[in-house]
Structures are given as C-alpha cells and as structure tokens.
C-alpha cells in the first residue's frame, strides 16, 4: 500500500482526502493570550506601531497618553494613506504576512504580527480606526471577549471613548489611522485610582521614557540633515514634538568618523561607519549629558544596527567578544542592513535584536577593535586625535602620553611606520594613507618624515 501524500516527504501535492488529515486550529482564547508574551516593553511596542505609520507614508504621527486611572488610554494617530475596510481586516489578522514573502525594500515589517503582538503586550483591547476616501472603518480585538466566546471574533465597533477620540483625531485629516489601547492591564492595572497623584506621575514618566526611545529609534527619519531629499517625519507626544537623538554626535566638530567601510555579505554591501565621540572636555555639559542616551554612556557604546534607517540595536558588541567598559564608551559604530536579510541576522519579531552572520564576524571584530582603540586613546588623552588605526584583531591601542618634539626620535618613527602599515592593512591606498597622516597629530607637524614613507618599504 502506498503512503498517503501527506506522509511522503517527497510528495508534491497537498492531501485533499479528508481521511488523510484533521484540522488542529488553535484555541482562540489560549492563542490570543499567548500573543501577549513576546517580551515587548511599552517603548518597543509603540515603536512597532510607528513602523506601520511610516510604511503608510505618514508625515506626522501623534501619540497621546491620557490619564484616567484604570480607564486611561494611549493612542497613535497618523496622517498616512489609511486603509479601506478589507485592508483593515487583513491588517488586524494575526500573521497577516509571511516572513518568506518578498518585501518592498523600504518595508519596516516582516512577520505580520507587530500591530497585534505589540498592542496585546500592553492592552486587553485594541481598536483601530482608519479613514480613506471619505469612509471610516473600525475593527477591534477584545481579549476578554475572545476568551469568553472561544472564537476569533473581530469586532466591527469600538467603545464610546474610542469613537469620540477617533472622530476628533481624524476630522482634520483627509486620510489617516488611529490605533487605540484600552484596558491597559500592563500599564494601568485594575485598582489604579484616578485620584492617585503618584500613579498619575508614574504614567506620564512612562511617556517620557517612550519619548527618549522614539527619538533614538527613528532619529534618521526625524533629522532634517538626514532627509535633504525628502520631508522629515514628525513625531509628537502629548502635543510636544520629539527631536532626533543622534547617537553619533555628527554636528560636533570633535567627533571623529573613521574610515567608512562597505562590508560584502552574500552579494550585498553593508555600510559601516565607525565613530569616536568627543572627549567630554570638548563639548558642553548639556550636550555631554544628552549624548549619554536613554541607557547611559557605557551601555550605549558599540554597534548601532539599522534596517531601512530604522534602529534595531542601540549599543551592543554583537557577541564579538568585547565588553562594555568605561574607557571604550566613546566608540559607536553605524551598521546598515537591507530588509531582505532579516533571517541572516536572526531578526526577532520585536525588531530589537540582531546577530551578525558568521561570514562577517571577523571583519566586524577587526573594525570594532580599531574603533575601540581610537576611542580609548581619545578617552585617555582628553580628546586629542591620537593616530590609533589598529585594525588587527588584537585590541592593543598604540598610545603615547607625551607629545613628540624630535622628528629624529626612533619612538616617533616607529609609531609612524606602524600607523602607516595599519592603514595599508585596512585597505587604504598608499597615497591616501600619506594624505591622512599629513592631517593627523602628531605626524602633521613633521610633513617631510611622512612624505618619505615611500622609501620605508612599508607599501606593497
């Protein structure tokens, strides 16, 4: 007797005989509760919602935190293209997109889960209203209702509070969408009292933390300097505009951009920009405090991994064997990856973790070592531009604590030669390496010695 098609690993057809299969649909109540357990915090959940707004070509996104004790709500409104009735139904369907589908290169989503899992992680009722071509569509997931009825019943209306808020928000827009959270048991659990000043303060403190997180995650969308050829995104939280937080301090003269790299990977070119931030003596106290970021100076060092300009990882050495230590806290490295390489980078649903493929770990480790060496030199030398260009895998910065005055010094000549060799090993052409050395302290004070490098035999 031949095996049934669905038992044959080489079968190319789908079993169609009802005797060969049975349906094993997930229990609605149990499954929808499980979707709450993806590990979001409030800030990462709201960032996922803003991804959808950006994908809908929104120019403005308004977040509102409204305090009313256990009846508090949070809303996200955008002026994007909106959704017709059928599109909204599909957007509210868990797993609305397969991660295997070919994506628009500018798409920020992947699993078709973000809207639902992010919202369920914080609230028991998610309502979305969308306006397009004069029509207003509404869909609502109520976790308590689904658990009670035991079916995936997506409601076609929201609460009175939602209806009033959505109509007010969308009345001024030609198209747009409102995402509305109620019954926020992870934020304002049952027993939260409207009159409690302490609980109210805690609620709005969470809004401040969200503001800092969004300023970081979407800084490349918010910064006018990053959007010369397009209109920058504007984010608002309780009617206050969110300014971009640039982790690389590119507006500071003392910030050092090391050699920009194009790292080849599986037929793609990944852009890597290593930065060394200024010593605190080179910037104002206010700018130094702001540059510490949401997590503080030490925790913000390392790689900043972006996907379509959206920040995924904010400060991590990506398992390359380095620790986050005080004397390396000025090292921050920008790394861009395309969205079709999500699986290669093990991107998770929350878009908050990414791991580099084995094929480029050694190259990233070399770049990280060189950046850390330069950052350590700046940290120890109070902001001087030290010629630390070591790109070997060893993390042994070439540093000296005293200036070199004698061009005949064997110590200076040895340092110059080693620095030149490091540049060549990094792929820098000899003429460009000499140009860089002529503009690098302390070598810039001894141009004759630098230009004589051709005779040292260091160049290939």
Image (cartoon, rainbow, N blue to C red):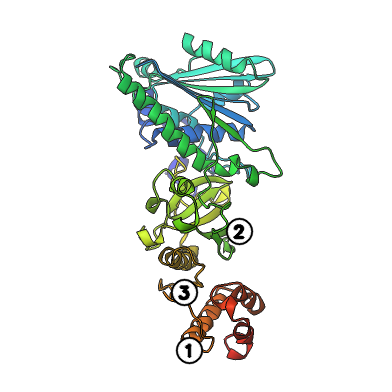
Return the x and y of residue 346 as percentages of the image width and height: 45, 50
Dot in front, 2 or 1: 1
Q: Residue furthest front?
A: 405
Q: Secondary structure at mark 3?
A: loop
The residue at which mark 3 appears reads as 392
Q: Which residue: 49% across, 81% down?
A: 415
Dot in front, 3 or 2: 3
The residue at which mark 2 appears reads as 268
The residue at which mark 1 appears reads as 410
Q: Is residue 107 left or right of residue 67?
A: right
Q: Is residue 427 left or right of residue 124?
A: right
Q: Secondary structure at mark 2?
A: strand
Dot in front, 1 or 3: 1
Q: Give the vertical position of 409 relative to 279 (above or below).
A: below
Disc 1 to disc 3, C-alpha distance: 23 Å
Return the x and y of residue 250 as percentages of the image width and height: 57, 53
Quadrant of the snapshot with the N terminus: top left
Q: Which residue: 45% across, 40% down?
A: 349
């Amino acid at each position: 007797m031949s095996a049934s098609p669905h038992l044959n690993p080489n079968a190319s057809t789908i079993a169609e005989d009802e005797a060969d299969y049975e349906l094993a649909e997930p229990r609605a109540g149990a499954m929808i509760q499980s979707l709450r357990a993806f590990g979001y915090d409030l800030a990462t959940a709201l960032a996922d919602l803003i991804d959808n707004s950006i994908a809908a070509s929104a120019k403005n996104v308004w977040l509102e935190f409204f305090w009313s004790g256990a009846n508090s709500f949070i809303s996200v409104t955008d002026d994007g293209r909106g959704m017709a009735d059928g599109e909204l139904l599909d957007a509210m369907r868990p797993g609305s997109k397969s991660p295997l589908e070919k994506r628009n290169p500018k798409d920020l989503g992947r699993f078709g889960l973000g809207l639902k899992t992010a919202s369920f992680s914080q609230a028991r009722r998610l309502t979305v209203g969308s306006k397009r071509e004069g029509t207003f569509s509404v869909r609502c997931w109520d976790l308590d209702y689904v658990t009670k009825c035991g079916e995936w019943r997506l409601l076609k209306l929201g609460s009175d509070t939602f209806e009033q808020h959505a109509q007010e928000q969308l009345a001024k827009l030609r198209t747009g969408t409102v995402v509305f959270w109620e019954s926020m048991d992870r934020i304002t659990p049952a027993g939260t009292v409207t009159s409690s000043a302490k609980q109210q303060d805690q609620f709005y403190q969470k809004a401040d933390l969200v503001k800092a997180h969004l300023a970081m995650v979407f800084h490349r969308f918010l910064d006018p300097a990053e959007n010369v050829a397009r209109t920058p995104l504007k984010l608002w939280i309780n009617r206050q505009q969110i300014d971009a937080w640039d982790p690389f301090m590119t507006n500071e003269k003392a910030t050092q951009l090391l050699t920009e790299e194009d790292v080849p990977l599986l037929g793609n070119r990944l852009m890597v920009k290593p930065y060394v931030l200024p010593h605190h003596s080179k910037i104002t106290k206010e700018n130094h405090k702001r540059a510490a970021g949401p997590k503080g100076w030490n925790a913000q060092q390392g790689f900043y991994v972006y996907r379509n300009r959206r920040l995924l990882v904010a400060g991590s050495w990506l398992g390359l064997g380095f620790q986050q230590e005080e004397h390396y806290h000025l090292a921050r490295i920008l790394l861009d990856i395309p969205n079709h390489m999500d699986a290669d980078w093990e991107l998770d649903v929350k878009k908050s973790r990414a791991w580099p493929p084995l094929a480029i770990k050694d190259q990233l480790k070399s770049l990280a070592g060189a950046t850390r060496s330069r950052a350590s030199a700046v940290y120890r030398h109070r902001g001087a531009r030290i010629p630390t260009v070591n790109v070997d895998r060893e993390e042994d910065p070439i540093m000296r604590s005293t200036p070199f005055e004698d061009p005949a010094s064997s110590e200076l000549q040895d340092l110059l030669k080693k620095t030149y060799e490091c540049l060549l090993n990094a792929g820098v052409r000899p003429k460009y390496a000499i140009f860089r050395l002529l503009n690098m302290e302390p070598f810039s004070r001894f141009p004759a010695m630098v230009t004589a490098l051709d005779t040292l035999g260091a160049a290939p």
